[in-house]
Image (spheres, rainbow, N blue to C red):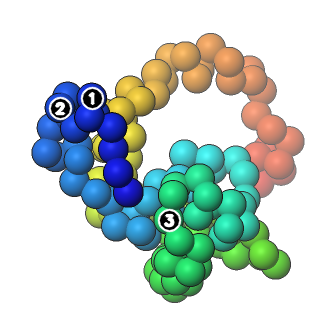
Amino acid sequence: MSIDRDTFENTTEDELAELSVPDQVLGFLAANGDRAFKAREIASQIGVDEGAVSTALSRLKDRGLVEHKATYWAVTDDTERLDGNSGYERATALFNEQLGTEDTESWRKHAPSESHPSVEDKQ
């Protein structure tokens, strides 16, 4: 995959270090954690061959990092498992560098004041 000259000149070597296909797939799914995608949609979004994405998804599923239903794929909601994955950590760090970190206070301002009924049912 090529990059433009401006990116080449203004980006550090660490930032240019390419993520593996599984890291790219996992990073994309994590960044879109509220949605599920078909393999071809993921491939299109990250600019990688669909076959490579399908292989990566199967390996990520074997490691419990993604979930699969019919033709759709989503990142796991098991945050402990994700946090223990070094590829996820590297992808998150690169996304944070490129897009900025999330502002916890901003999230809290928009959070509902009461728990969702499903949370209350478990208590």
Q: Amino acid at mark 2?
A: Glu
Tag shown at residue 65 = none
* Front-lying residue, 63 or 122: 63
Residues at marks 2 and 3 touching, judged by CB atoms closer than 8 Å: no
The secondary element bearing badge 1 is classed as: helix
Reading the image, the residue beneath label 2 is: 9
Mark 3: few, some, or many residues within 10 Å (few <14, many ≥20)? some
Does dot 2 land on a helix, a strand or a loop?
A: helix
Label 3 or label 1, whichever comes before in sequence order: 1
Q: Is residue 89 at all visible to an observer of this figure?
A: no
Which class describes the residues within 10 Å of circle 2: few (<14), some (14-19), or many (20+)? few
Task: Locate the N terminus and report the quarter of the image it occupies.
Answer: bottom left
Identify residue for label 3: 48
Residue 8 location, quadrant: top left
- Kindly identify the residue that appears in the image at 41 percent across and 30 percent down: 99
Residue 56 image position (x, y, % from top left): 49, 77
Residue 31, position as x, y percentages in the image: 54, 46
User: Residue tagged by mark 1?
Assistant: 6
Residue 62, compared with residue 101, is above or below; it is below
Contact between labelled residues 1 and 2, with CB atoms less than 8 Å apart: yes
Amino acid type indicated by mark 1 = Asp
Q: Is residue 66 above or below residue 92?
A: below
Q: Amino acid at mark 3?
A: Val
Q: Which numbered mark, 2 or 3, is in the foreground of this view?
A: 2
Q: Are marks 3 and 1 in contact (CB under 8 Å)?
A: no
Which badge, 2 or 3, comes first in the chain's sequence? Answer: 2
Q: Which residue: 50% across, 17% down?
A: 105
The answer to whether residue 33 is left or right of residue 95 is right
For the residues labelled 2 and 1, the Cα–Cα distance comes to 5 Å
Residue for point 27% across, 29% down:
6
Picture coordinates of residue 65 (x, y %)? Answer: 51, 70
